[in-house]
Image (tube, helix red, strand yellow):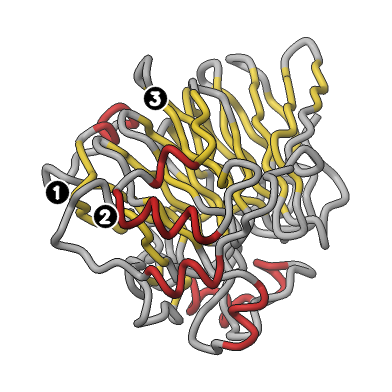
Amino acid sequence: MPLYPLTFEPIYKEKVWGGQTLQILGRELPGQTIGESWELADLGNTSASGGGGGDARSVIAQGSLAGKTLSEVIAQFGEKLLGRLPLTPEGQFPLLVKFLDARENLSVQVHPSEAYAQSHPEAHLKSEAWYIVAAEPEGCIYKGVKPGITTNQFRQAIEAGTVVDLMNRIPVRAGDCHYLPSGTCHALGAGVLAAEVQTPSDTTFRVYDWGRTDRELHIEQAMACIDFGAVSNEEYEKRSHVAGIFTTVSRLVQCEHFIIERIRMSEGYEQEIPYDQPAVWMVLQGGGQIVQPNGPTTSFAKGQTLLIPAAMSEASVKLEADTAWLEVTFPQTANTQLA
């Protein structure tokens, strides 16, 4: 059975802060407060002590493998799907990919620090990046605690409900990208639609929830994890651009866990897919086909997320419109890229 690019059934999660903005990606939503769409998930180890979204495993949406879970296909195809990419120690795909729709502010939260995770086996590291797909004029994120703030000052702010006054508020617009390593206190502001690429954990500790009283806070766990040092992610967020007549590749984030690039290609352009390792595409606009001479043709469109297998014979992408997507690859296996 020849492998082909895999698309998945979205896993929608209603959230008190969610809305309907995912409709701009061509989605028909199953509820009024959809906060998250898990696009690619192989998650079975969420900590019961945190405020995460629970375990989930993506199901393939199309082709001869439709109905199988990602973990089942990994077990079936192994290196043909993954190449040299290692799984997590739990045997899971090493990414969780989502869209987030913040109609209202997300809770101020933190994910386990390395020291906390080492001493609490039920907690799992979660480093993530947010690519801003759309934002209202006042859209912002909160990223890290301001320099010089002490733990005592932060505790007093929790009691007073003034936590965000001690955080770095960063205005955002479409096309911005921010890296948030584990231990960074953060929140997604109201009016922002983001694509999230993260390590496969959903252990989340809420420290402040904007006056909402119906959800648990995890103040002691959060205080044990928050990095009170200055936020300095420049080494991970160095942008670079490679432009040709028909293509542009913009590197947005490179960390030890993943590389995120924004790819633009012109309508009618065709190019070979040169990988021998897996890649994830999150399609932001346009669409086209991935063609294999000895395998099925896969159509893709705005709003879809694809897992490109490592082993596809002579595959090429053909664009039916001006098209842009986020491309996620892995530093430990990266060798060739679209250019």
Above or below — where is 120 with respect to 102?
below
Residue 106 pos. (x, y %): 33, 46
Q: Choose the circle earlier in sequence order: 2 or 1.
A: 2
- Circle 3 sits on which residue? 139
Q: Which class describes the residues within 10 Å of circle 3: few (<14), some (14-19), or many (20+)?
A: many
- Circle 2 sits on which residue? 12
Mark 3 residue element: loop
Which is more toward the observer, 166 or 277?
A: 166
Above or below — where is 78 with respect to 32?
below
Q: Is residue 249 left or right of residue 42?
A: right
Which is more toward the observer, 55 or 51?
A: 51
Above or below — where is 209 with respect to 168?
below
Residue 129 pos. (x, y %): 58, 46
Q: Residue at x 72, y 14 (%)?
A: 246
- Circle 1 sits on which residue? 30
Q: What kind of residue is marked 3?
A: Gly
For the C terminus, give its image quadrant: top right
Q: Is residue 41 left or right of residue 151?
A: left
Residue 179 pos. (x, y %): 63, 45
Q: Residue furthest top?
A: 245
Asked whether the beta carbons under mark 2 and mark 1 sit within 8 Å of each other, the answer is yes
Q: CA distance from mark 2 to mark 3?
A: 23 Å
Q: Residue at x 14, y 49 (%)?
A: 30
Mark 2 residue element: strand
Q: Which class describes the residues within 10 Å of circle 2: few (<14), some (14-19), or many (20+)?
A: some
Q: What kind of residue is marked 2?
A: Tyr
Q: Which of the 4 quarters of the picture holds residue 116?
A: bottom right
